[in-house]
Image (spheres, rainbow, N blue to C red):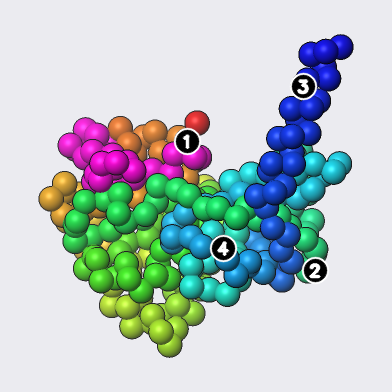
C-alpha cells in the first residue's frame, strides 16, 4: 500500500512538473497529406525560442494528465506560428488523437527546445547535405528557410526519401513557393538542391538514399562530387534503419559524428535514434 501511494504521489508530482513546462496553444490549420501523414500549425508563445533544426515537446491533456512526444519544428524560428509534421498511428497513444485535431483545438507546447541538428555542431564545410526519410524532413524544413545557413555553405542539398510519391510532403512548397519567396527566394534558387526519392513506385529518383550514395547516382544526378571529409557536412534525420546504415557508411569514409562538445563532419538527431 505504501509503495502504491508513493508511486501515485510521484506520478502526480511528475505530471504537475510536466504541465508547468507546457503552454496551451491554438491549432490554426491542419493538412492531411495522406492517410498516414499530416501536419498542423498552431500559435506560438511570444517567449518560445529555438534554433532552426531543433525539436520540442508537443502534446494533449488526456485523462487530466499531459501526454507529450518530441516533435521537430517544420517552421523557421522567425515565423509567427509553429508547424509540425506527424505520422498517423491508429493505436498510438498521442498520434491517434493528434490526427483528429480541428482548427481551434488546444495543443500543449513545451517552453523549451533542444536538439543536435544545428550548424554549430558541425565543422566548417562548403556543402551541407540534409538527408531525411519520412517525417524526418521536418527539422530540415526549418533549416532551408534560414537565410543564415546560406552564408555558411555554398550549396545546401535536401534529400527526402519516402515509400510513395504522395508522401513527399512539402514537395510543391519547396519547388514552387520557396523559390518565389520575397526574402529568401534568390538564396533558394541559387544554392538549394532538392532531391526527393521514392522506394516503392516508379519515380524519377528511385531507391534508398544509402543505395543512391553508394552507387553514385545521387552525385551524378546533383552534379556534385562524392562525399569528402574536407568539403561535405551532413545532417541525418529519419528512420532508425536509415540512420544506422548511413552512419556506418559515413564512418567507413572517415567521417566523425559531431556532438554538443565536439563539432564533427555530421550530426544525427539522437532523440529519435533507437
| Res 196 visible | no
> Where residue 182 appears, x then y in whole percent?
43, 87
Per the image, the residue denoted by label 1 is 273
- Relative to 179, does residue 86 appear above or below in the rendering? above
Q: What is the distance, in whole Å, between disc 2 and disc 3 at their CAs?
A: 36 Å
Considering the image in quadrants, where does the N terminus appear? top right
| Res 139 visible | yes
Depth-wise, is mark 3 or mark 1 nearer the camera?
A: 3
In the drawing, does residue 42 fall left or right of residue 71?
right
Residues 12 and 174: in front is 12
Per the image, the residue denoted by label 4 is 48
Per the image, the residue denoted by label 2 is 104
- Relative to 9, does residue 271 appear above or below in the rendering? below
> Between disc 2 and disc 4, whose residue precedes?
4
Depth-wise, is mark 2 or mark 4 nearer the camera?
A: 4
Q: What is the distance, in whole Å, between disc 3 and disc 1 at their CAs?
A: 29 Å
Q: What is the distance, in whole Å, between disc 2 and disc 1 at their CAs?
A: 33 Å
Does residue 173 show up magenta in the picture? no
Q: What is the distance, in whole Å, between disc 2 and disc 4 at their CAs?
A: 20 Å
> Where residue 43 appears, x then y in whole percent?
67, 69
Q: Which residues are magenta?
A: 249-272
Q: Determine the residue positioned at 80% across, 63% down.
A: 105
Amino acid at each position: 500500500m505504501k509503495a502504491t501511494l508513493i508511486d501515485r504521489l510521484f506520478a502526480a508530482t511528475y505530471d504537475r512538473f510536466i504541465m508547468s513546462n507546457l503552454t496551451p496553444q491554438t491549432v490554426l490549420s491542419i493538412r492531411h497529406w495522406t492517410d498516414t501523414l499530416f501536419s498542423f500549425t498552431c500559435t506560438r508563445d511570444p517567449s518560445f525560442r529555438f534554433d532552426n533544426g531543433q525539436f520540442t515537446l508537443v502534446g494533449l491533456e488526456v485523462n487530466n494528465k499531459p501526454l507529450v512526444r518530441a516533435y521537430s519544428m517544420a517552421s523557421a524560428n522567425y515565423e509567427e506560428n509553429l508547424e509540425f509534421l506527424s505520422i498517423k498511428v491508429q493505436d498510438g497513444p498521442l498520434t491517434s488523437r493528434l490526427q483528429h485535431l480541428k482548427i481551434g483545438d488546444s495543443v500543449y507546447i513545451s517552453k523549451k527546445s533542444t536538439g543536435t541538428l544545428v550548424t554549430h555542431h558541425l565543422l566548417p564545410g562548403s556543402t551541407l547535405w540534409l538527408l531525411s526519410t519520412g517525417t524526418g524532413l521536418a527539422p530540415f524544413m526549418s533549416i532551408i528557410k534560414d537565410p543564415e545557413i546560406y552564408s555558411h555553405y555554398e550549396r545546401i542539398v535536401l534529400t527526402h526519401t519516402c515509400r510513395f510519391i504522395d508522401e513527399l510532403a512539402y514537395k510543391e512548397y519547396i519547388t514552387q513557393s520557396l523559390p518565389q519567396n520575397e526574402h529568401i527566394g534568390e538564396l533558394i534558387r541559387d544554392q538549394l538542391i532538392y532531391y526527393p526519392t521514392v522506394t516503392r513506385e516508379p519515380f524519377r529518383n528511385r531507391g534508398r538514399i544509402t543505395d543512391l550514395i553508394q552507387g553514385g547516382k545521387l552525385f551524378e544526378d546533383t552534379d556534385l562530387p562524392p562525399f569528402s571529409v574536407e568539403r561535405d557536412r551532413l545532417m541525418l534525420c529519419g528512420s532508425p534503419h536509415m540512420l544506422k546504415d548511413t552512419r556506418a557508411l559515413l564512418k567507413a569514409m572517415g567521417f566523425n559524428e559531431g556532438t554538443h562538445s565536439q563539432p564533427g563532419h555530421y550530426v544525427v538527431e539522437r532523440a529519435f535514434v533507437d
